Each structure stands twice: as structure tokens, then as C-alpha cells.
Amino acid sequence: MPLTVKPLTPVFAAEVTGVDINRPLSDAVFAEIRAAFDAYSILVFPGQPMTDKTQIAFSERFGPLEPTQKSNPATGTVFARQSNLDIKTGEPIPADDRRMWYQKANMLWHADSTFKKVTSLCSVLSARLVPEAGGATELASTRAAYDSLTEAQQAELEDLIVEHDIVYSRGLVGFEYTAEEAAEIPPNRHRLVRVNRNTGRKSLLIGVHAKEIVGWPWSKSRALLDDLLARATRPENTYRHEWRDGDVIVWDNQAAVHRATPYDTVKYRRLMQRTTISYSAEMKAMEAAAG
Ligand code: OGA
Ligand code: MN
């Protein structure tokens, strides 16, 4: 069966079928997947129920995996667990529990790991338990946001540096870290404009963790970051995925933002396992190419 890539919107996102991503992939087949990823930013693989082992093997084809932060219940593994189920008991976590509060921040547009020292190339999210209603994930193209700017506006962005801060962004939903926790996750700075090394297409590293443009007054900085996010999330630049059992999505954290949507966390069970691929190998490849 040939690998088929079917665009899901005119702007970005594609569905990939005709390949079993739970089995070892030849270099030739993976090259087709990587090319589709570079072209579409979002790849949806419908109905490919993963185990932790197969998810790790598939994810590692994109690059080295990040360890999971302390605040996630799956810390100590390479998985970030997005679930309303207690990791030990498997029972729903009460709605007012700090862990559920923390997850609410996923409902704000973001890219994963932009607040870290090294950002992320992409994330792989596999649906293990899908609620009967709600819990869709929405994705938006920051490449489309960049493309929507005039050449003069693009030139103004070229050298801007953005400070990303998860203590700031979690504060927006009323989640407070202890001083001890906050000290372990200081802000980090990254270039606003990103370049895909295979296609040369540019995109923006923005989203809720993007606190401010370094050296700019607060209000001017907020106005620009808010405008750029609004451009990315225009309806025509978004794709909404209603999950079905076993679906897998790979999203580009350099060229897209995403957000969770609500579901009844008392009535339903939802378990999504995320692996996050570091940008470190991409940076090395780009340095090598630059000589
Ligand atoms: C994530 C995330 C959204 C969702 O796993 O990084 O933001 O719908 N998930 O679970
Ligand atoms: Mn996320």
C-alpha cells in the first residue's frame, strides 16, 4: 500500500495513510514522512494505536527526545501525560485538583517547550483514551501568520528576540508556582523568526509562553505578539482534530501553535501520551550546513 498524503486544509495539515508507524520504518519511507512534515507542519495518522515502546521508536526518527518536566505526572519518563486520570490509580482527578488546574493552560494557544533553553522540533501526541464528547485539539499555522505579513513587516521581525516564560503564561490562568519550582524554570530567549532547514519556509515562534520582545516597551511588545498570534489563529489558518481511538498527530512546534479544548473531566476518561522531540539536532544540522 503506497504512503498517501492528503491535505486537510488549503494552508497546512495533512492526513497520512498507507504506512504502519508502529513498525520499524525504512529510511526511504521515513524520508517521505519527514518531507510531508516539512511541507504541512501537521501530520495526522488516523487509527494507529501506539504503545509507549512504538511511540518512542517512531518519535526518535525525528530526533532526540526531551525528558519530561517535573510538573507533569509522567516526569522521569520521555512522556508528557495529558489526562484527567490519576497516573497511579487510573481514577478521574477531582476538577479542583492542582493537576487539572495546570492542564487548563493547555487551552491557550501555545507551542510546546518554547520556554525551555532548547526549543522543540515537534511533538507526537497519541490518543490512548478518547472521551465520548469534547477534547478536540486545535492547531494553527504560524507559517501562515508570517506569510500574511508584507515584506517590510517581515523585515522588521527578522532580528527580534522573544523572551518565553512559563511562570508568566501559567500565571495567566491563575496557576502559581512555588518560588522553588519557579527557580527551576527561568525564562529563555529565542529568535522570533524560524526557518525550516529543508524548505526554507519561515514561521514564527509565538504562543502563550512568548512574554515579550527583548528591548521593547511592554505595550508595544504585547501589541505585536498579540497581532502575530491573531494572524496565526485566523479560522482559515487553523485545523481542528476530533480524536478517534488510536489517532496520532505530529505537530511542528516551530511552525504551528495548538490548544486543547474542554471535555467533561468528571464523566469521561481522556489519556493522551506526548513525546517531544528536541530542536537540538536541527540546530546542529543547520550549523553543519552553514559550514
Ligand atoms: C500537548 C497539548 C492538547 C490536547 O500535549 O502538548 O497541548 O488536546 N495537548 O491534549
Ligand atoms: Mn501542548
Image (cartoon, helix red, strand yellow):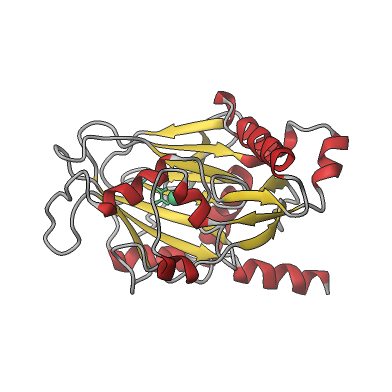
Residue 222 horizontal side relative to residue 158, left or right: left
Give the number of callouts. Answer: 0
Up/down of 65 relative to 5, above or below: below
Instruction: Kindly give the residue lying farthest to the front in the view shown.
Output: 179
| 252, 44: nearer the viewer | 252
Q: Quadrant of residue 283?
A: bottom right
Q: Is residue 126 above or below residue 15?
A: below
Which residue lies at the image location 71% right of the left edge and 43% below the top edge?
A: 221
Residue 184 drawn at (x, y percent): 47, 71
Query: Which residue corresponds to the image point at 23% horizontal and 46% vertical from the top-left?
Result: 270
| Closer-to-camera residue (235/51) | 235
Check the picture and name the quadrant holding the C terminus.
bottom right
At which x and y percent is residue 136?
Answer: 35, 35
Report the side of 225 relative to 75 (left or right).
right
Q: Is residue 261 visible?
A: yes
114 and 180: which is toward the camera:
180
**Residue placed farthest to the top in the image?**
235
The residue lying at 14 percent from left, 37 percent from top is: 267
Task: Tell me residue 37's x, y (percent).
Answer: 57, 50
Residue 126 rendering spot, x and y as whole percentages = 34, 52
The answer, for residue 24, to whether it is visible in the render is no
* Residue in front for this viewpoint, 277 or 89: 89
Left or right: 116 with respect to 74? right
